[in-house]
Amino acid sequence: MFFLADLDQRTVVNMVAALEYVCRKLPPDHDTPALRKSIADEIATSARAGKTSLADLRQAGLAVLNKVLHPPKDYWFRRLF
């Protein structure tokens, strides 16, 4: 199990800053608790993998946001099945 207490203070600060940065970019029609949780989970996964810089954590969060805002072109077709 993953606990914030297992991370150094700088990493936790970077995680919070990255989450706030990405969430500020959420369009109002996509701003849901579930999406915010997905972004936070991906940031935590990045931190666990040792990518703890602010830039790395922001990039991890933005990747989730980009998948939601710009799904692959065949996404609509895959949803049918």
Image: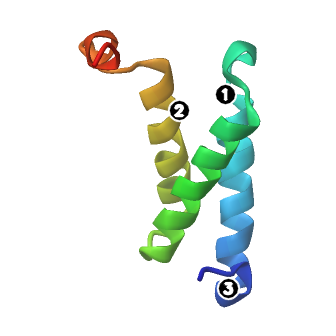
Question: Is residue 52 something that shows in the picture?
Answer: no
Dot 3 or dot 2: first in sequence order is: 3
Residue 75: quarter of image: top left
Choose between 75 and 29: the one closer to the eye. Answer: 75
Dot 2 surroundings within 10 Å: few (below 14), some, or many (20 or more)?
Answer: many
Dot 1 surroundings within 10 Å: few (below 14), some, or many (20 or more)?
Answer: few
Question: Is residue 30 something that shows in the picture?
Answer: yes
Q: Which residue is mark 1?
A: 25
The C terminus lies in quadrant: top left
Q: Position of residue 70 (x, y in %)?
A: 41, 18
Alpha-carbon distance for marks 1 and 3?
Answer: 27 Å
Q: Which residue is pictured at 68% across the width and 39% down the height?
A: 34
Q: Amino acid at mark 2?
A: Leu
Image position of 62 (left or right of 75): right
Dot 1 or dot 2: first in sequence order is: 1
Q: Secondary structure at mark 1?
A: loop
Alpha-carbon distance for marks 1 and 2?
Answer: 9 Å
